[in-house]
Structures are given as structure tokens and as C-alpha cells.
Amino acid sequence: MNIDKLIEQVKKPSLYESGTSIMWTDPHISRQLLDLHTNPDNDMASRSSEKIELIVEWILSKVKKDQMDILDLGCGPGLYAEKFAQSGHHVTGVDFSRTSIDYAKGKTEKNCSGIKYYCDNYLNIDFENRFDLVILIYLDFCVLKPDERKIVLDNIYKALKHGGRFIFDVVNGKNMEAKILKPSWEVCMKGFWKDEPYIVLNKGYHYPEDKVLANQHIVINQKNEIESYLFWSAYYEYEELEPILKESRFQKIRHFDNVLPKGDAWNGDNVTFYIAEK
């Protein structure tokens, strides 16, 4: 094993540095993610079925409009999209993962739910005055770098009809110590990262001056090949997020701390939901 190379890989990354590998397009990892997404009992890649049901009910209670045109960005395997379609709405889903989109297409065909799915990065969407509601759920807004954030917000604003709503959730600044990934390591014959033996080193970092967290995963296979995966997550309070939304012309901005029951890991102690209007 090249220890010098490993030491170089595990040092604290500079802000928004890229890893050497991308999780979403790796065939093995994307299958593992799909299994996590579609497990109704865990919150690892999507929230549990029970929580998704509660969030969809909450969203519909805030919009209160029949037969909406809804755009689900980062739709994954279509868990939210199917719920909205079952309530009589017309849904379009966009996700970067081909594995998730293929699964979602199979599901909508089976259920005859009529959802349109596109495999694309939502930095590239180009809809205009099409949707009554755009959702970006499961903290996807937090992973956007500042320059990407502006592009996505402008794309969403353009996609909405006049009076349309943008609903999304973000990590807030509470309980920060609990949100920093503790150092750990695993040795596996096969698992989430590889379909072969590997070692993975995990560590989290906090950049308080930028209000950003990073999760770093260093994966080493039997050939001593080293891959690094870096996941960035900004956290926001209303005072910081309101001007960012207003810069992209959103108005009537509201925030909600307890969409899920008190005591849940995804409630206002860790996550805040926002509604903004075109």
C-alpha cells in the first residue's frame, strides 16, 4: 500500500474540492442506492414511506390546488412523484442517476401513473412557465455549490408559472456537533462501495466560516487502488437563505421547522422546509 498517497488523500480537503470518483454514475453504487431508496423502512437515501406520505400531505395542504403540473427535481426512483400522481396531479421527474430513472419509468408504466421522467442534471433543465409546483426534497439544495445554486434557482423560477411555488428542505444550523461525521473505518468482503473486498475510511469536516459540512470516504480495493468520494452540504438559516431566494426573484418566502413530528431526526431540530413563490 502506498502510505504517502493515502496520507495525501485523507487530509482535510479544501472547500468544495472534488473527489476522484462520482457515486451517482458508478454502476455498483447506484444499485446499492436504489436498494436504499426503495427500502420503505429506512431514511438512508430517501425518507421512509411513512415520512414521505406525511411530507406529501403537508405539501398538498400548503398548495391546495387540483391537478397541478409538478416538477420533482432529484426525483430518484419516483417515490414522491408516484404519491403526487396518485393524488391526481401531472408529474415530471428529473434525476442524474440512470439506474433510478429506469426504475421510476418501470414503476410508472406498471402503475399507469403517466409520469414523465428525464435522466439529466437539473443544472441543465430548460422549462418555461410550465409548473404550478417545483419540489427539491431530501436536502438536495444543500449540496449545490454557490455558483450552481444560482443556476438552479433561476432555472426553477423560469420553470414555474406565475404564482407557482417552490418547496424544498435544507439542513439548518442546530445540533452541529451531531451533524459532523465521526471518523470510522470498515473492512468488507463486499458492500455499499464495492462488489469486492475493500477498506473504507470515513471522516467529516466542518467549515464554520462558510457554513458547510463535508463527508469524506476513502475506498481502497485489493489492488491498493484508492478512490475518494466527497459530499458537500451547506446549512442555512432563514436570514441567509431569504436574500439568496430574493436574488432569483422569489417572493412570499416562508419557513417551517416541524413538518415531521417532534423527536424525528428530520424535524426542525435538524431540517427546515421552505416555500417560495414566483
Image (spheres, grey):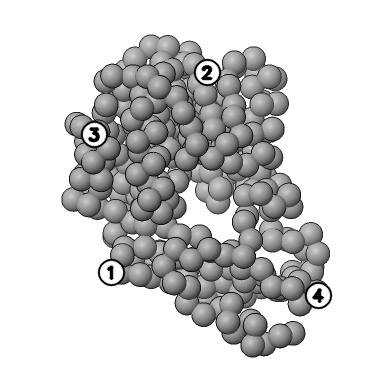
Front: mark 3 or 4: 3
Circle 4: residue type = Lys
Spatial CA distance of label 3 from label 1 is 27 Å
Pointer 3: residues within 10 angstroms few (<14), some, or many (20+)? some
Spatial CA distance of label 2 from label 3 is 32 Å
Q: What residue would you read off at disc 3?
A: 249
In the picture provided, is 92 more to the left or to the right than 211? right
Front: mark 2 or 1: 1
In the picture provided, is 197 more to the left or to the right than 61? right
Residue at position x 62%, y 65% in the image? 20
Spatial CA distance of label 4 from label 2 is 49 Å
Badge 2 marks a residue whose secondary structure is helix
Q: What residue would you read off at disc 1?
A: 209
Residue at position x 47%, y 40% in the image? 123
Q: Earlier in the sequence, mark 2 or mark 3?
A: 2
Q: Are marks 4 and 2 in contact (CB under 8 Å)?
A: no
Q: Earlier in the sequence, mark 3 or mark 1?
A: 1
Res 260 quadrant in image? top left
Q: Earlier in the sequence, mark 1 or mark 4?
A: 1
- Per the rendering, the mark at residue 223 is 4
Spatial CA distance of label 3 from label 4 is 52 Å
Spatial CA distance of label 2 from label 1 is 44 Å
- Per the rendering, the mark at residue 135 is none
Badge 3 marks a residue whose secondary structure is loop
Spatial CA distance of label 1 from label 4 is 39 Å
From this view, report whether residue 222 is shown above or below residue 162: below
